Amino acid sequence: MIRRLKYNEIDFEKYTQCLENSEQRKYSATRDFLDITARDQWEILVYKDYEAVMPIPFVRKYGVKIVHNPKLCQQLGVFSKKDDLQLNIQFLNYLEDHYLIRIYSFNDGNKLSEGFRTKKNFLIYPESYEKVYARYSPKRKRKLRLDQEVLDHSEIKEVSYEEVKLFIESNIIGLGKETDLSSFLQIFEISYHKNYLKFHAFYYHGKIINAIATYSDCNTVALLGTFSDKEYVKLSGASVLIDTKIKETIANNSFDFEGGDIPNIEEFFRGFRPELKPYGIIERSKKELFRKLGILLARGKFF
């Protein structure tokens, strides 16, 4: 039996235990990560006594609750001791029958029915760095061999949020409006001060030209942001930063690139020779939302 629990009804000890023992374990479903990215606007679906769980983040528009993955939260879905197609379908049906869905992502460990829409993500699993590096593409290896002049006048540093904030503000791309920037920065700041997020910067002649943000939890290091000064893109600072982070962590942690659907980004990530790990996603238009709202209201199932 699947039931819905609001945030204040969740037994977080049982929820966390279910996640930690699940086959699909993801840092993005943890209480801390969802509290940071969705605040208290998330609830869960539970199977029996926390044998399986499904976190459901949402936003409110004109008093209406709409399921929407929060910023920087790539994958959620069903978490259970052993992934089960039929159980996943039960959760999916409950989600479809009781909620308005704008965007909701399952995880790469969830089996779903054929034809379900998927998006790309890339992962490198724990292994010795030497073996990981040996698989890099010839082009990526060339990019990592910096010219002597660059070597003489560059350095990599771990930096604080305060040190890198202005650089991120000036070089973040793909945001639709000013409020998006504010939301991203707030997530970065809170995650940094909770010791989940680290920033590394590539300095050239004393100034930052590249930076990355990585989130660490659940034996995973996730690349939540790559920021580059376009004037220096040919120096390959982003490649060097990512390679350095992989070198430091890959023996005991997976490295999650957190994306890959945009062609030039996919090409960049593939240079590190990660594994393709697609995940299922539901994405609905505003027109579809209004139509679904009418159906749910008529059924008396909308809450």
Image (cartoon, helix red, strand yellow):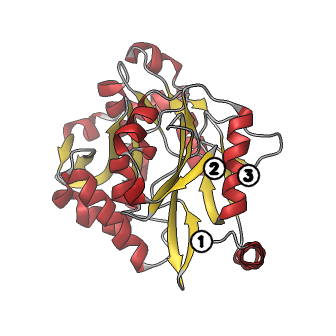
Closest to the observer, 101 or 281: 101
Asked if marks 1 and 3 touch (Cβ < 8 Å), the reply is no
At label 1, the amino acid type is Phe
- 211 left or right of 220? left
Q: Residue at x 20, y 56 (%)?
A: 161
- Point out the frontmost of discs 1 and 3: 1
Which residue has dot 2 on it?
Answer: 261
- Disc 2 residue crowd, few under 14, some 14–19, many 20+, Cα 10 Å: few
- Point out the frontmost of discs 2 and 3: 3
Residue 254 position (above or below residue 295): above
- Point out the frontmost of discs 1 and 2: 1
At label 3, the amino acid type is Asn
Q: Residue at x 65, y 39 (%)?
A: 278
Q: CA distance from mark 2 to mark 3?
A: 27 Å
Which residue has dot 1 on it?
Answer: 303
Q: Residue 123's spot in the image, x, y percent?
A: 52, 32
Q: Which mark is residue 93?
A: 3
The quadrant of the picture occupied by the N terminus is: top right
Q: Residue at x 41, y 62 (%)?
A: 38
- 50 left or right of 248? right
Q: Earlier in the sequence, mark 1 or mark 2?
A: 2
Residue at disc 1, secondary structure: loop
Q: CA distance from mark 1 to mark 2?
A: 34 Å
Q: Residue 36's spot in the image, x, y percent?
A: 33, 57
Q: Earlier in the sequence, mark 1 or mark 3?
A: 3
Closest to the observer, 292 or 209: 292
Residue at disc 2, secondary structure: loop
In the rendered image, is residue 239 in sight? no
Q: CA distance from mark 1 to mark 3?
A: 16 Å
Residue 239 position (above or below residue 228): above
